[in-house]
Amino acid sequence: MDFEIVSEITDVETIAAGTSVRDRARLRKQYGRGRWRKLKGVAKVRLLSGRIRLAEVHWYEAHGIGKREFKLKLPFLD
Amino acid sequence: MKKAEKPSAHFVVCLNNEGYKASLEVGKLYRFIPDKEAESEGMIRVVDESGEDYAFDAERFHPVSLPAVVEKALLAASTA
């Protein structure tokens, strides 16, 4: 991960599930078969510069596998 | 003879996909979106395999200059 999440993730929502997860085949290949979902939420993140910003983060999740590939959406929320 | 086309810079090549093996592929070209906020943090905003743009460590990528005709084709394909 290219940043560190330093707070609780709030406002969690599923933004894609099942066949609407575009990376589904790649997720299966890398992490295993599962019911992959793509989720978003809001958290404070520590960036490479050391600065802390409020940002929307996205990630993939499947039951029994867990959360994978947290990614940072721009623009920052603060 | 055709005039040489001036290369532009809207694409980067991925050098490192550690931690993002579903979202990025090493050696693949990705469209980057100029973003001063990202750049000020040592990051780069890139459209990844999901089709959405995210901020990644700029060290994961290297800019690529492509002939305009190639960029036009890649941009058309990425927005299709």
Image (spheres, coloured by chain):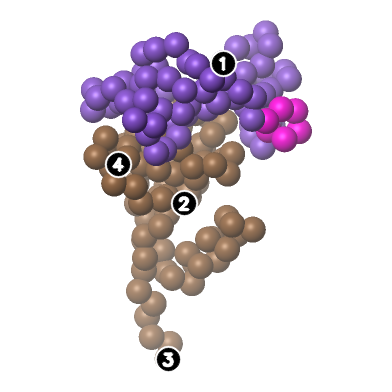
Chain shown in purple: A
Label 2 sits on a secondary structure element that is: strand
How many numbered marks appear? 4
**What is the distance, in whole Å, between disc 3 and disc 2 at their CAs?**
30 Å
The mark nearer the N terminus, 3 or 2, is 3
Residue hosting label 1: A67
Left or right of residue A70, residue A55 in this image: left
- In the image, A9 versus B18, the foreground residue is A9
Q: Tell me what residue is drawn at x 73 percent, y 20 percent.
A: A35
Q: Which residues are magenta?
A: A16-21
Q: Residue at x 54, y 60 (%)?
A: B74
Q: Of circles 1 and 4, which is in front?
A: 4
Real-space CA distance between mark 1 and mark 2, rounded to the nearest whole angstrom? 26 Å
Q: Chain of mark 1?
A: A
Q: Amino acid at mark 4?
A: Glu
User: In percent of the image, x 29 and y 46: which residue is there?
Assistant: B36
Frontmost of labels 1 and 3 is: 1
> Which chain's colour is brown?
B
Q: Which residue corresponds to mark 4?
A: B37
Q: Are marks 2 and 4 on the same chain?
A: yes
Chain-order first, disc 3 or disc 4? 3
